[in-house]
Image (cartoon, rainbow, N blue to C red):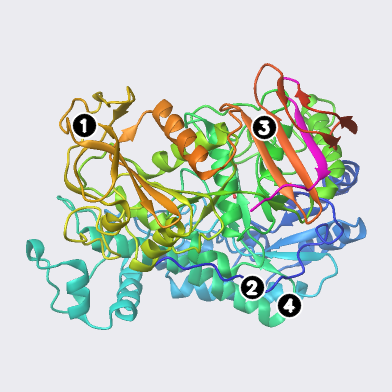
């Protein structure tokens, strides 16, 4: 199920990295502009210090306005101009959105929603990931691109498609149905095995022929959870297969590294990126602050830590972010004074060595004309351009951090597949949500100043002192063993409710919940007793909890807290079992934010992980090399903070003795020698 990361050998990455500076980059859409504007664009890119531009992301309709030969003349010219200016190119294969003729001539390439409705062209990404015709047309373009530009001197990186699965991840058309059946045959071999895995004895769902197996289209009742889970897996694999098809064309004709921009974010859950990561030469993420969330900055930190997990700790690229507002949220908030620098550094602190923006020049037309850009509608006269210049200068000063690794002694186990499965239609409570729970534990650790590596299930956790396992609902036996091994070898492990409940087919692990962790935690859950939406329960410690309670039987653990009231009154709410050199804690409820903080404080103390108590609006992260430590301090608060750290501040170019005072809204990156231990 989960694929432990095996990365390619170290690859030469994009120039800029090699040169030891943080890469500043952007998407550039020259097809939206007259060529006379290009001259100005390139002059200003040089003035700003842009190293890398992503072009041809949406170029297909310009290259092939009608079916037939490609017209590369404009792309040739902009490639040459960028090269002449010393700006490197992150070249889109251009397949992310087909030209309008595709839907007219090949309407069967259009995707369908679960209720059978057609997704029409007119937006972007109107293609079915399993369509052989779309694949063929896309690969014709990729082949022509690779042959023409594969050894172009400006080319630094291949950018396959764009945000694969942003709009078309789940397609329910007949073409997808056939591809789903092929995928299932490969997974199960026989129909009997599929029937067993999906538990189709239930509700008369047994399949007698492969032809009857469909995507989980809209139904009047809850669907089959195992069917839904496999369709998500298939859909993620279908897009990965598309990536790999383009990748293989590129690799056969060019030796330049290949990647695509991932969307490690709260509002996209459809790709299991643990299985994608090994295929990318460089992990690249797109991240935008999401103001629909309670704490967008905490989510930025989570996304960046997870992206670093995908990169197996190696430096990664922020392929897209915004200088200020986006254009796709209900209210598109502009960044406040200094926020561009703070958010960009939030990514650098957590391992990004390239910071790239969507986009270079703000569009005049189209659905993103109100999206911010490095060069805003006001041109170079306003504050927008001034903040772009400020950021560029700052990134230059941070060159010494390039190539260093983030130091973390805590890990959080994250699973897209548990995210998919835990939030199914027929669970004990819809109020228990996977991602918010993962976010809450990460957010609490961040506010304790504890840096967290976010890792895949099955990762070898040796070397971590603290391991947090939020709502890991589905996992394999091997995944469970890796967590138990961490405790046995000395880590403090915390498991939160609704973890270890089912196997990889979403079938209950029998014998009392949580089947995968019962032995490890030394307790068994006899019954879930979820709470009503507004209800809270009181625990013996005085802590309050919401959403979830359980009737717990202790087998071989200490009871550290108990439900005082609510449907599980008198039952254990928090247990601890000493395991080998470490321990396994289990919480049987959803503690409120203060409760999570208090629990993690206790666990950090037990694990020997220093908690700095910095609060929710401060990032403190160390990047280290063999000899140096760079302490990033990002103060999102409206008052100054003081942090005990000494060294040379790369931001202000000042010597800091004893402790650093970081003014409201300011950032510090303090270089010092490396003396104490790190992970
Ligand atoms: C990304 C996308 C870009 C642009 C950007 C706007 O999802 O890759 O093309 O649309 O969002 O925020």
Q: CA distance from mark 3 to mark 1?
A: 40 Å
At 65% across and 57% down in the image, what residue appears?
Answer: 57
Number of the front mark, 2 or 4 = 2
**Image mark for residue 8:** 2
Q: Residue at x 84, y 31 (%)?
A: 380
Residue at the disc numbered 1: 531
Mark toward the start of the polypeptide (3 vs 1): 3
Whether the residue under disc 2 has CB within 8 Å of ligand 1: no
Magenta stretch: residue 671 in it?
yes
Q: Earlier in the sequence, mark 3 or mark 4?
A: 4
Using the numbered discs, state the Cα–Cα distance from disc 2 to disc 1 in whole angstroms.
47 Å
Q: Quadrant of residue 186?
A: bottom left
User: Would you say the beta carbon of the disc 4 residue lies within 8 angstroms of ligand 1?
Assistant: no
C-alpha distance separating marks 3 and 2: 35 Å
Circle 1 residues within 10 Å: few <14, some 14–19, many ≥20: many
Q: x, y percentage for residue 559?
A: 28, 39
Label 2 – label 4 distance at C-alpha: 17 Å
**Residue linked to disc 3:** 324
Instruction: Please identify the quarter of the rendering in which residue 646 is found.
Output: top right
- How far apart marks 3 and 4 lie (CA) works out to 36 Å
Give the quarter of the figure containing the N terminus.
bottom left
Q: Secondary structure at mark 2?
A: loop
Q: Are marks 3 and 1 in contact (CB under 8 Å)?
A: no
**Residue 306 left/right relative to 399:** left
Q: Which residues are magenta?
A: 663-679
Query: Which residue is disc 4 drawn over?
Result: 254
Q: Position of residue 2 (x, y in %)?
A: 42, 65
Disc 1, disc 4: CB below 8 Å? no
Please say whether residue 459 is visible from this viewpoint: yes
For marks 2 and 4, the one nearer the N-term is: 2
């Amino acid at each position: 199920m989960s694929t432990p990361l095996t990365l390619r050998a170290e690859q030469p990455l994009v120039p800029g990295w090699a040169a030891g500076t943080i890469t500043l980059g952007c998407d550039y859409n020259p097809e939206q502009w007259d060529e006379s504007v290009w001259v100005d664009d390139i002059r200003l890119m040089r003035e700003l210090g842009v190293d890398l531009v992503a072009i041809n992301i949406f170029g297909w309709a310009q290259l092939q306005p009608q079916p037939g030969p490609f017209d590369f003349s404009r792309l040739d010219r902009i490639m040459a101009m960028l090269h002449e200016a010393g700006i490197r190119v992150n070249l889109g294969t251009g397949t992310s959105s087909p030209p309008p003729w595709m839907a007219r001539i090949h309407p069967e390439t259009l995707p369908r929603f679960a209720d059978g409705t057609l997704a029409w062209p007119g937006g972007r990404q109107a293609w079915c990931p399993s369509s052989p015709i779309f694949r063929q047309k896309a690969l014709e373009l990729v082949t022509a691109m690779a042959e023409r530009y594969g050894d172009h001197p400006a080319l630094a990186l291949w950018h396959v498609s764009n945000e694969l699965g942003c709009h078309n991840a789940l397609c329910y058309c007949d073409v997808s149905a056939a591809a789903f059946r092929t995928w299932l045959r490969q997974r199960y071999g026989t129909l009997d095995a599929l029937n067993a895995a999906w538990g189709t004895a239930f509700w008369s769902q047994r399949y007698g022929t492969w032809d009857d197996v469909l995507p989980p289209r809209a139904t009047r009742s809850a669907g089959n959870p195992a069917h839904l889970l496999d369709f998500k897996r298939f859909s993620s694999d279908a897009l990965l297969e598309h990536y790999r098809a383009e990748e293989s064309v590129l690799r056969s004709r060019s030796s330049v590294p290949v990647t695509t921009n991932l969307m490690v974010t709260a509002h996209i859950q459809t790709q299991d990126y643990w299985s994608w990561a090994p295929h990318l030469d460089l992990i690249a993420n797109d991240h935008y602050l999401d103001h629909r969330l309670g704490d967008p900055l905490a989510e930025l930190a989570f996304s960046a830590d997870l992206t670093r997990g995908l990169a197996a700790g190696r430096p990664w690229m922020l392929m897209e972010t915004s200088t200020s507002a986006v254009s796709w949220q209900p209210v598109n908030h502009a960044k406040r004074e200094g926020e561009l620098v703070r958010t960009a550094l939030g990514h650098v602190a957590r391992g990004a060595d390239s910071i790239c923006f969507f986009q270079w020049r703000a569009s005049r037309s189209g659905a993103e004309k109100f999206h911010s850009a490095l060069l805003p509608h006001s041109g170079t006269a306003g504050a927008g351009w001034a903040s772009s210049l400020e950021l560029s200068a700052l990134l230059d000063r941070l060159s010494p951090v390039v190539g260093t690794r983030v130091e973390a002694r805590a890990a959080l186990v994250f699973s897209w597949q548990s995210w998919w499965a835990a939030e199914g239609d027929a669970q004990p409570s819809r109020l228990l949500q996977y991602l918010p729970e993962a976010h809450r534990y990460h957010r609490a650790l961040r506010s304790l100043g504890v840096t967290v590596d976010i890792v895949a299930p099955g990762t070898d956790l040796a070397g971590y002192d603290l391991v947090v396992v939020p709502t890991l609902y589905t996992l394999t036996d091997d995944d469970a063993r890796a967590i138990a091994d961490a405790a046995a070898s000395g880590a403090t492990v915390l498991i939160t409710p609704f973890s270890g409940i089912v196997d990889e087919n979403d079938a209950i692990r029998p014998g009392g919940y949580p089947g995968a962790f019962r032995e490890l935690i030394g307790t068994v859950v006899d019954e879930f007793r979820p709470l009503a939406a507004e209800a809270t329960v009181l625990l013996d410690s005085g802590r309050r909890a919401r959403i979830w309670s359980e009737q717990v039987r202790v087998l071989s653990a200490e009871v550290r807290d108990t439900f005082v009231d609510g449907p599980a009154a008198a039952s254990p709410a928090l247990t601890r079992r000493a395991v080998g050199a470490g321990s396994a804690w289990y919480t049987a409820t959803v503690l409120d934010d203060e409760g999570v903080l208090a629990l993690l404080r206790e666990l950090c103390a037990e694990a020997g992980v220093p908690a700095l108590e910095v609060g929710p609006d401060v990032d403190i992260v160390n990047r280290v090399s063999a000899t140096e430590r760079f302490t990033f301090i990002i103060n999102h608060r409206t008052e100054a903070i003081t942090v005990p750290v000494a060294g040379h501040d790369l931001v202000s170019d000042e010597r800091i003795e004893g402790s650093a005072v970081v003014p409201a809204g300011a950032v510090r990156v303090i270089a010092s020698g490396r003396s104490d231990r790190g992970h």
